[in-house]
Amino acid sequence: MSIKRIFLYGTLFMQCMNGCIIKTEQNVQELLMSEEAFQKEMEDKQVDLFTLTNGEGLTVQITNYGGKIVSIIVPDKDGNPGDVCLGYESLDEYVNGAASLGATMGPFANRIANASFELDGQVYTLDKNNGEHSIHGGSAAFRSRVWDVVEVKEDELILSILNEDGNGGFPGNLRLTVTYSVTDDNALKLQYHATTDKKTVINFTNHAFFNLAGEGSSDVFGHELKVNAGFSPPWMQPRSLPGSFYRWRERHLISGPLKRLVGISMMIISS
């Protein structure tokens, strides 16, 4: 399978003459994923690819399979568009590839130790899909299910999904609705709204990956990292994040201590 190439460009604002605008629009069209490559029926629902645009140079593509962000196309300081989001080119590749790539995670993102938790004195046993633990919801994971399409606009997409009581071991009929929208200042916003008829545990996020290095680059070690948080959980220090955690509250190159890690998984508590 082929993963589409990733780019990142510094600013999200474009100013150019008419000829430049036409050329830029053509370049954006070349970067877009084919909608036909995502159109298929699964779980008795129609899967599709949706394209959002704000008219200011930002274009985002999302599929309702896993609520996944497929591409984020933005212009650089010279008005040249590039795709900043790692993703696949077809639905089949998403089904058979990395399950979390670009996905909206739930009913519980990250791990639950020993695949169980206690709530109001009752112990709930979950699916084990990460050794002895449960990760990203186990068999109930939203990343591998087809979401309902609630509303589609030029600059907004609303998706919804139901996790029925007991599915994956989680209590309550949980309904999650996510609104994806692009703003006039070239931001992509995700808003989460959940309801349930029982006490339960939830943890939502999106699992998009980005490369800031530019077209043709194979790694991100030239990127600068800043952790925008006031403090970290005790288990993050010192092994999970090389060097003092507080050092990373200022911008530093990822190369060096972080480069020696095979992978980094961080949970940050925002200030």
Image (cartoon, rainbow, N blue to C red):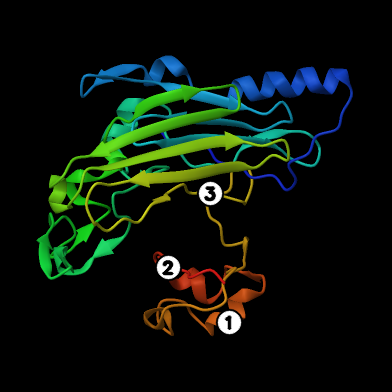
- Helix, strand or loop status at disc 3: loop
Left or right: 52, with 175 as reference point = right
Tell me the quarter of the image containing the C terminus: bottom right
First-in-chain label (1 vs 2): 1
The numbered mark at residue 267 is 2
Query: Pointers 1 and 2 in contact (CB under 8 A)?
Result: no
Q: Could you tell which of marks 3 and 2 lies nearer the N-terminus?
A: 3
Q: Is residue 93 above or below residue 143?
A: above
Label 2: element kind: loop
Q: Which residue is mark 3?
A: 210
In the rendered image, which residue does mark 1 sit on?
A: 246
- Looking at the picture, which amino acid does disc 2 mark? Met
Front: mark 3 or 2 = 2
Badge 3 amino acid: Phe
| Relative to 167, residue 254 above or below | below
Residue at the (50%, 44%) spot, across then down: 191
Classify mark 1: helix, strand or loop.
Answer: helix
Q: Nearer the viewer, residue 39 or 125?
A: 125
